Image: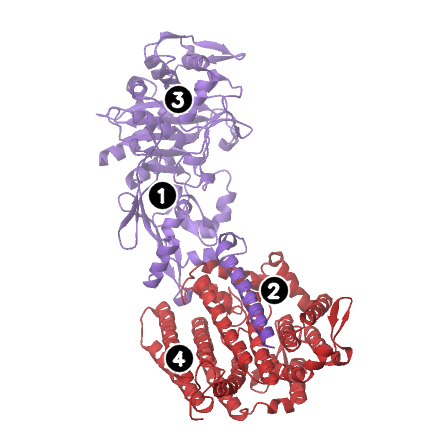
Amino acid sequence: MNRQIVKLFGLVMALFAVLIGFTSYWAVFEAKALKEKDANKRPLLEQQRIERGRILTADGTVIARSVSKGRGANKRYVRRYPEGALYGHPIGYSFVREGDSEFEQFHNDELIGNESEFASIVDELLGHQQKGNDIVTNIDSNAQRVALSALESAGFGAVVAIEPSSGEVKVLASNPPFDPNRVPFELTELNQNEIEAPLFNRATQGQYPPGSTFKVVTAAAGLDSGAITAETPIDAPGSLEVEGTALENDFGQDFFGATLDTALTNSVNTWFGQLGQQLGNDTMFEYMERFGFNSIPPIDLPEDEVSPSGVFFEEELLDHNDPVDLARMAIGQERLAVTPLQMTMVTAAVANEGRLMKPQIWNRVIDPDGRVTDRLDPSEYSQPIDEETAAELTTAMEGVVSSGTGTNAAIPGVAVAGKTGTAETPGNEACGGGVDENQAWFIGFAPADDPEIAIAATVECTEQFGNDVAAPIFREVAEAILDEG
Amino acid sequence: MISARNRELAALIPVALLLTAGFAAVFAQENTRLGDLSLVYGAYFLAVCLAAHIYLRIRLPDADPYLFPLVALLTAFGLVMIYRIDADLARDQANWFVLGLVLFALTIHFLRDYDVLERYRYTIAAVGLLLLLAPRLPGIGQQVNGAYLGVELGPLAFQPAEFSKICIVVFLASYLREHREVLIVGARRVLGVTLPPLKHLGPLLVVWGASMFMLVFIRDLGSSLMFFAAFLALLYVATGRFSFVVIGMAMFLLGAWFFSSTVPHVHDRIEVWLDPYSDPTESGYQVLQSIFAQADGGLFGKGFGQALVTIPGSNDALLPAAQTDTIYALIVNELGLFGACGVVLIYLLITARGFKIALLAADGFSKLLATGLTAVFAIQAFVIIGGVTRVIPLTGVTLPFISYGGSSIVANFVLLALLLLISDRARREAGSSGRLGEPAMGGS
């Protein structure tokens, strides 16, 4: 019988090996997939046991923190947002039941202190409980407040401010705002409010017609491709027939032999329309893509909460192979839809000698012991235009503010470069269908000779022009930032 | 040379230290303040184990030195895990551990000459079957999660299947010892398959019938599988005919397939095993949560006392039956794949020692009894761990020595006592005839 006993033991060994095999399958190989199952509430329940790190502004104001509830095994943490609606965008929210959004979602791993398997073992052996890291953002609390209150008195819209040399996002405001503290109580109502859409981050998701601000892109393409120089004259009549309908300048004014400075300062539609036609599809789209159009901007927010900019047809992005009305695209019409973030990136690239830095909200990660474990290392996204082009564009944009269409953006004692935009949006349902509704814009940077801040401000559904409603917002925000610097 | 008992003593000390460390870890997790309570518990546990050890030193000096420490290790492990779920449950379990050791000692005391079991084999078989039936008897029977596994006699509630498995193994070992020759010699080949002689097939069919009966009346696939597999293991060892095992397995699967389609509870268990996601919040909840708990553990686990058992802020179970059925999932959750490998390894070592005893035993009954007891123990561990890891359908069998439950721990200590009794005799005889590589302790 001994032979059989030995064989039986072999069988038991085989059976136990099967058990280990299955255990490794669930615990290790399949673990990731299992954690993502809808039926598995564990990851969420686990997360609320971790003291999520705080989120702070550049100057140390606490935007988000965690407070503990319950004791012992029931102890859990709940998110609080002491500043309420001021940072609803771009920080978002994080709750067990309602999920998370925006910055809270993108930086989840750092905030809950997810580390490598090895680091967590060491922590366990040392008896440390997992604790989240704090994140200090680049957000300037004073400028954010100024931006949001300026928007609130102007209308729905958004403001984005970026430091051109680093890509640090100083302001990212969207009106109407939402108070993340209310999310656990009224998420459904917030979601169903389609007119105000307070959860919708207009700064990164709002796709608006750019109007004349897009002329900066057209001018950049013209100069940088060598098609024109700053001195090249173009005859721009008051009206020009394009694709069967007239393209007109304001008041039908003629600008014969105008150069870039004149054309930009006076926002001459027929001048830029002709330039766009001269450049052609390939060049126009090449420069748009260099500035970041047609892809999702590389900001530290979830991809599904950041929209691309470009020419849209039936919600699809068009490219250089598609037929477009070049003249109207060159002046920001056609079917162009852009986000305030994208226009800020265009401005920041011009301000930073043609180099576009990746826009980033976060600045540094601080572990529970107070050590800085990670710091933003500014990196270049692209170089859409060369330094000379940037300098020539800057000069032209200074003219817009000093003597052109954007005089309300002027700051005493500081040279400002900028461009206004007023896109007519008659019959826009979001605006209640009024016939005189505009999308008002101002993009610009200051000081023009040594730029510290690049800003895009836009207001939707206004009967006013860019210079009347958007330029003052630019000025207020720029002043708030420059005063501190 | 270190004597068997001294080796046992040397092995018990690290076990007590592990228990102390385990409690310390749980305390550290629960109230950050580290008292000396874990030391008290460790000392208490060591004292109880030492008492048992001294008893073994006197009564069974030659018995296997590793079995008791290995079992103590599992018990210690179970105590810490249960304490971590609920301190009150752990206190019960500690009391049952002591009660188990008392029955352990009584078994050794009264069954020193365990051959007497052979004489009462039919009585024992009848008791075993009666025990199995008891949960369906009106007045005392209890239904737990759709299966009839519990019995309540006044203040005493227990799971008779735990004791029944020992009775059945004793009967089978004795019956097969007597009939194995006939089963081998009388076998004939039909269509290339070796079949047992019909005349002696009767009692074996009775065993098959009994396990099918369990499936239908007790409605527990787990115990049914455990009993029948132990029977097949014994049949194989007794006759050496692998074909008997194949036939038996085929008969079991056929029966299980037939009855599972007629007994709703068993049918549900199988459906849920095949596709737990079809009903993730009700019938599939336990299996899925048990797997999710394992996924949460990963390679190294979350550490003692760190895993979620209930949903925070409520008393709802996140891992249902964490102290009994799914305790293995909790182990994987807290100690990871490595911890689980450790636990399975301890079961494998106990199995190895058990089969070693069977190998050393001189007479047929001792051999078969040791084999049967070891096999039923190993299969029980397989059935519940396999259920929790979805190798087989999840059923309500306990994880021996670890799961919370008085019947389980007491019955398994009786099982251990029988194994040590066989071992003591086998090693003494082997030692005196010089077959064993190590000298037996002199004196007794």
Q: Which mark is residue B322?
A: none
Letter of the red chain: B
The answer for how far apart the CA atoms under marks 4 and 1 are is 64 Å
Please determine if labels 3 and 1 lie on a single subunit. yes
For the point 51% across and 19% down, which residue is it? A324
Please identify, in this view, whether the residue under mark 2 or under mark 4 is nearer the observer: 4
Q: Is residue B307 visible?
A: no
SS assignment at label 1: helix
- State which quadrant residue B297 falls in: bottom left
SS assignment at label 3: helix
Q: Which amino acid type is shown beneath numbered disc 1?
A: Leu
Colour mapping: by chain
Q: Is residue A8 visible?
A: yes
Please identify, in this view, whether the residue under mark 1 or under mark 2 is nearer the observer: 2
> Image check: B41 left or right of B209?
left
Q: Is residue B60 above or below residue A92?
A: below
Q: Which mark is residue B392?
A: 2
Letter of the purple chain: A
Q: Which mark is residue A86?
A: 1
Question: Is the residue marked by circle 3 packed among few (<14), some (14-19), or many (20+) residues within 10 Å?
Answer: many
Q: Nearer the N terminus, badge 3 or badge 1?
A: 1
Residue holding disc 4: B12
The answer for how far apart the CA atoms under marks 3 and 1 are is 32 Å
Cβ atoms under marks 4 and 1 closer than 8 Å: no
